[in-house]
Image: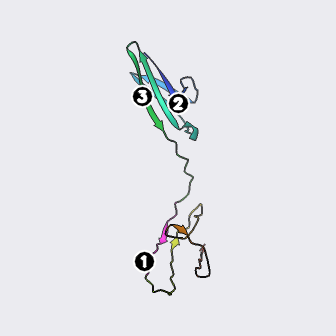
Amino acid sequence: MFSQWFHGDKCIDTDPQYSITYNNGEAIVIKEGAALDDEGQYSCLAVNQKGTEKTISRVVVNRKVEPGEFPSFTLELGNVMARAGQKIKLEAEIKKVSPAANISWLKDGKPIDESRDMKINLVFFL
């Protein structure tokens, strides 16, 4: 019996980036330090005098997460009731994070632009 490993259509049996071992019928391929171009279909083809068998795996490589913090609100928006023509004030506080968060206001999923009737104030505390 023999087997071959593939990434897509390329045989990786002799590729030095991969470590391939066989132990008691178990075939293992290891790739240290996954990169985005390692994503794709991997397959192992096993062949003996009785026939051929193939198993397939799809590998997805996510981008490396940079150190830092996710933005979080220290004061979240609440519901507001107003009469037509009344001033509405919405306030939210965001915890200081690194890297700095991009802040935008949305209404019905669309960005709000400052206008004669709409004022947006961003206040930063150090």
Identify the secondary structure beneath mark 2. Answer: strand
Few, some or many residues within 10 Å of mark 3 (<14, 14–19, 20+): few
Q: How is the image coloured?
A: rainbow
Q: Considering depth in this image, is 9 or 21 the residue closer to the camera?
A: 9
Circle nearer the N terminus (2, 1): 2
Q: Is residue 79 magenta?
A: yes
Q: Is residue 1 magenta?
A: no
Residue 7 - label: 2
- Name, please, the residue furthest toward the top: 49
Task: Please give the name of the residue rendered at 44% of the width and 80% of the height, measured from the top-left corner.
Answer: 80
- Where on the picture, by quarter, is residue 47? top left
**Which region is colored magenta?**
70-80
Q: Considering depth in this image, is 27 or 88 the residue closer to the camera?
A: 88
Q: Amino acid at mark 3?
A: Thr
Identify the residue under disc 1. Answer: 79
Task: Please give the name of the residue rendered at 59% of the width and 60% of the height, measured from the top-left corner.
Answer: 99
Side of 97 where 77 appears, left or right: left
81 relative to 41, above or below = below
Side of 60 where 124 appears, left or right: right
Q: Considering depth in this image, is 112 or 100 the residue closer to the camera?
A: 112
Residue 55 - label: 3
Q: Considering depth in this image, is 116 or 12 the residue closer to the camera?
A: 116
Q: Amino acid at mark 2?
A: His
Relative image position of residue 49 (x, y in whole percent)? 40, 12
Quarter the C terminus occupies: bottom right
Q: Amino acid at mark 1?
A: Asn
